[in-house]
Amino acid sequence: MVAPIDISAVRDLLTPEVMLELIDFEGARDDYAQLQKRLSDAGGEDRDLFRKAELLERQAKAAESDLENMARSPTVRQSEINDELKRIETMRADARGLRFTAKCREGMQEPISVDLASKRNRLEGDQVTLNRKIWKDILERLFAQEGIRESFLQAFVLSRALYLTEVETN
């Protein structure tokens, strides 16, 4: 695995062409992050809708239990019972509506997931290509410095000699 490069430290070493590719890549990466957040937010909203529906169902059950107790009372009026029945039915209808909405929205997440996977694959490939171009630009700039080629050649020759003598002695 290659260690990542701090791009901010080498931006001034890049050719204009590679710099434009880097800017495009960073834009695509930001778009990917926004799409990822959109998918995450949509999933969270759906979970919230299901939770709210469950809460309404529990409240409706509790209200039914209270209604049974109320109906046993000799002083209760029929209009109070009817009002409570309407309130219970409204809670249940709202719960059904929330669940229906959440289920309909679940299908909307699939295209986002497919788009997200496509963007991720493209970004991974672009990252490898861009890294190679960045490394090449940096190396070209380094090798263009006066005397650097000779220094690297001398370091290579010395390292090779040291390695070969260690291999021979072992």
Image (tube, rainbow, N blue to C red):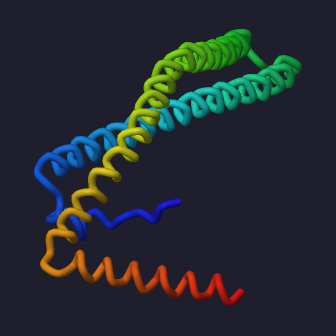
How many marks can you see? 0
Q: Position of residue 164 (x, y in %)?
A: 56, 82
Q: Residue at x 47, y 19 (%)?
A: 111
Which sits in the foreground, 74 or 5?
A: 5
Which sits in the foreground, 168 or 35?
A: 168
96 vs 142: above or below? above
Please state if 21 lies on the left or on the right of 59 as rendered: left
Please state if 148 lies on the left or on the right of 71 as rendered: left
Question: On the rendered image, what quadrant is the C terminus found in?
Answer: bottom right
In this view, the residue farthest toward the right is 72
Q: Position of residue 25 (x, y in %)?
A: 28, 43
Q: Position of residue 116 (x, y in %)?
A: 45, 30
Quadrant of residue 52 in the image?
top right
Q: Position of residue 9 (x, y in %)?
A: 24, 70
Q: Residue at x 40, y 81 (%)?
A: 157
Q: Residue at x 53, y 20 (%)?
A: 110
